[in-house]
Image (cartoon, grey):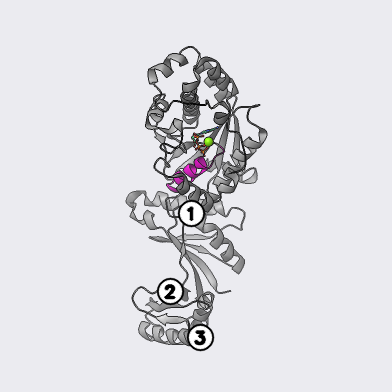
Amino acid sequence: MVWKEILIRYGELSTKGKNKMDFVRRLRQNIRYSCADLPPLTIRTEHDRMFIAIDSEEMKEELVKRLPHVFGIQSFSPVASCEKDMEQMKMLAKYVLKQYEDTTYTFKVEVKRTDKKFPLQSHAIQREIGGTVLSTYQNLKVQMRKPALELRIEVRLDAVYMMAEVIQGAGGMPIGSNGRSLLMLSGGIDSPVAGYLMMKRGVRIDAIHFFSPPYTSENSLEKVRDLAKELTKFGANVRLHIIPFTEIQLKIKEEVPENISMTTTRRMMMRVADKVREEISALAIVTGESLGQVASQTLDSLTAINAVTTTPILRPLISYDKLEIIDIAERIGTYETSIRPYEDCCTIFTPANPKTKPKLDKVEHFEEKTDYETLINRAVTNREIHVYPEKQKEDKFASLL
Ligand code: ATP
Ligand code: MG
């Protein structure tokens, strides 16, 4: 067994000064969380990097699969190790570079010699190992400035360490380092992407979904549950609040003229969301809205919706084109679930010609006819709450919620 550890580089975290310890602690916690079903990890933290000990080839493979999803990691590298002996070092160098044997790469060897008693100097080590490697892999071409591939060798006091592969991390910040927000999660393509982008910036997510049985089916609800589950793969649990919305929607249909009913529906959703947000001590509400995409997403409509609260409403997709959103959805693996057919509570009640410039005073006038506050409180009280991932992890990580 030559693989010894995985080296993790933090990237953006390194610049965070006094909050850095908190970020590093969270990153460590989130890495453990995403590997909760593996044997417990041994993690060592240094100034600006972190090391996870590995004790088998399978464990290395498993981490290489999972770490790219954990926010806060800029890049990482599997590190191999051997004794301080030139013959062993040559063999290890060939082993570490084996995966690159099929393609032409520019290449160099970089040596750091911390153990000053090692008989060969850095330059000599570089030459000898370089010679061996180049005669074995003729596809490698030496280039000292910015080569595509770099074999880094460190001769430390205890052993020799080598790495070549640099795997891209997800970037961003560890989830939890930027507080909690409530994501309005429909069954569409946009809202899971909005949730992902906020999680990437370190925000812990609760999700809220409005459903209107019998107008929306159990299948649509199942789909939203699956989307919430998919968001957990980025390294944090997600709590889903399911709001019974039929009563409010029927009331709106009865009382509000059709062409502004969409605005009132959105405003009521926002009021319900804001109450749930307060109960769970979240600081903001996140939506998947994108400017101009539909009638309820014009600046006039968004202004009328915002008017029900002073809570910050974060719309990470506001400037994205639909194709850009689809691109991210495909990359993060939510697209396939999002395009499953479903009925959204809004589309079912959608009027033929919703106003793109709803007049706030008119909207408020029609809302005054009904005691929505009572209906909203009832919907909040009667909500169902699910936590993902389900069971074992839920108990084990309750303290992280
Ligand atoms: P999406 O693909 O996210 O469904 P969309 O383009 O279909 O977006 P709308 O249906 O107008 O847009 O919804 C805009 C935003 O409002 C959604 O991104 C989501 O944040 C929120 N939303 C809409 N319907 C619901 C719902 N049933 N439950 C929770 N949030 C919702
Ligand atoms: Mg939708």
Residue 28, percent across and down?
Answer: 48, 54
342 up-or-down from 106: above or below: above
Are circles 2 and 1 on residues that touch, CB within 8 Å? Answer: no
Residue marked by disc 2: 149
Crowd around label 3: few <14 · some 14–19 · many ≥20 (10 Å): few
Residue 142, percent across and down?
Answer: 39, 81
Residue type for callout 1: Arg
Q: Which residues are magenta?
A: 187-202
Q: Is residue 248 left or right of residue 132?
A: right
The foreground one among 188 and 116 is: 188
The foreground one among 176 and 253 is: 253
Q: Taken as a whole, is the magenta stretch helix, strand or loop?
A: helix
Residue marked by disc 3: 136
Residue marked by disc 1: 28
222 up-or-down from 31: above or below: above
Q: Which residue lies at the image location 52% right of the left edge and 53% below the top edge?
A: 331
Are circles 3 and 1 on residues that touch, CB within 8 Å? Answer: no
> Disc 2 beta carbon < 8 A from ligand 1?
no
Marks 2/3: CA–CA distance? 16 Å
> Number of marks in the image?
3
